[in-house]
Amino acid sequence: MSAMPLHDHHKRRRARNYALGGVLLALVILFYLITIAKMTGGGQ
Amino acid sequence: MTDASYITERDEAGSAGLETVCREAQPADYLALLKPRVMSLVVFTGLVGLVLAPGSLHPTLAVTALLCIAIGAGASGAINMWYDADIDAVMARTRGRPIPQGRVSRDEALGFGSVLAVGSVIVMGLAVNWVAAAILALTIGFYVFIYTMWLKRRTPQNIVIGGAAGAFPPMIGWAAVTGDLSLMPVLLFAIIFMWTPPHFWALALYRSDDYARAGVPMLPVVAGARETRRQILIYSLLLVPLTLAPWALGLAGPLYGSVAALLGAIFLLLALRIWRSETDRPAKHMFAYSILYLFLLFALLLAEHGLGWRA
């Protein structure tokens, strides 16, 4: 059974979701690094 | 575009609905809402303030501070596009933006901008310090409420006063490191503040029809091209000595002083050409050069600092 073909708007929505996921991942990494910097006294 | 509006428009438009599908917002449209070209100059001037400030900041926190400046500036741009969607649709220079093109709804732009604005200030406050966060909040508020909502459609002095919003980033960068302000960041603020009128009026001179059509009372629309040319010259005469102040006050070295004098002489020459000319050509040259001028002035300060030539 073949998968349903993706419409253009599905592809576009997928691109948007990937972008949003990328932003969220970047934020997680940023907050992690900020926490490390603060804990090691970099914020003083 | 929201799912609901997408469905409604497709149903109502019938075959034209395909067009709606093709115009669904993409990540690039949200990026365009942040006015990336404006953002790049803002980030650069913020970086200069951050680097010139005495003391040090953990690299991660420095990057965070610059990110917050960038996002805060971008958020202001998105909220500006929400408020100015009606005039953006009329002006040739702005009608390709995501809202007039129908790729992003006004509500989405407002929500996007507001979340980013609040988020950038909170992250700046929690990660860096609350002085920098307060100046960032002031910058966003000034651009949105003072410039966009109050001044832009009311007075030809809109970009003179509103220019302060674009001048704050070096102060934010400085405050991110020191937690306070001193003479140098105020000078950097003053340079950008005085640079803004000749920069924007040069653009407005050859885009005056666009502004007139949109009902924006830019100086050439209200007072005419002749008066605008005179004002560009006056502000240029005030700006160039001000750019030499960091060197005169011992806050910058001889490299900055000499090159700033040379660049300033070119700026004055272009302002004089605008004043004498009746054509748009000198104004176009001034607009392009003014961006390079500000960039080079701040790059010189960075270079001197890097070379250890700072007084």
Image (cartoon, coloured by chain):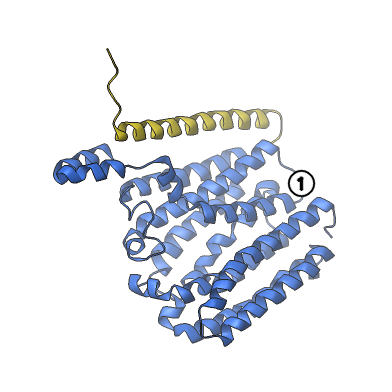
Chain colours: A yellow, B blue
Instruction: Describe residue B60's horizontal placement relative to residue B199 as left or right.
Output: right
- How many dots with numbers? 1
In the rendered image, the quadrant that contains the C terminus of chain B is: bottom right
One can see residue B280 in this view: yes
Q: Would you identify the image quadrant in which residue B258 lies?
A: bottom right
Name above or below for residue B32 compared with residue A27.
below
Residue at the image point whose x is 69% and y is 75% from the top: B266
The percent coordinates of residue B134 (x first, y second) are 56, 51
One can see residue B234 in this view: no
Instruction: Describe residue B194's horizontal placement relative to residue A14 as left or right.
Output: right
Instruction: Describe residue B27's horizontal placement relative to residue A39 as left or right.
Output: left
Amino acid type indicated by mark 1: Gly
Residue at the image point whose x is 71% and y is 35% from the top: A42
Secondary structure beneath disc 1? Answer: loop
Q: Residue furthest top?
A: A1
Name above or below for residue A3 compared with residue B9.
above
The percent coordinates of residue B45 (x first, y second) are 64, 56
Name above or below for residue B165 compared with residue B64.
below
Residue at the image point whose x is 46% and y is 44% from the top: B116
**Chain ID, mark 1:** B
Residue hosting label 1:
B55
The percent coordinates of residue B46 (x first, y second) are 63, 53
In the rendered image, the quadrant that contains the N terminus of chain B is: top left
The percent coordinates of residue B276 (x first, y second) are 58, 87
**B73 and B281: which one is in front?**
B281
Label 1: how many Cα within 10 Å (few below 14, some 14–19, many 20+)? few
Q: Would you identify the image quadrant in which residue B275 lies?
A: bottom right
**B11 and B137: which one is in front?**
B11
Residue at the image point whose x is 51% and y is 82% from the top: B279
Q: Would you identify the image quadrant in which residue B23 lies?
A: top left
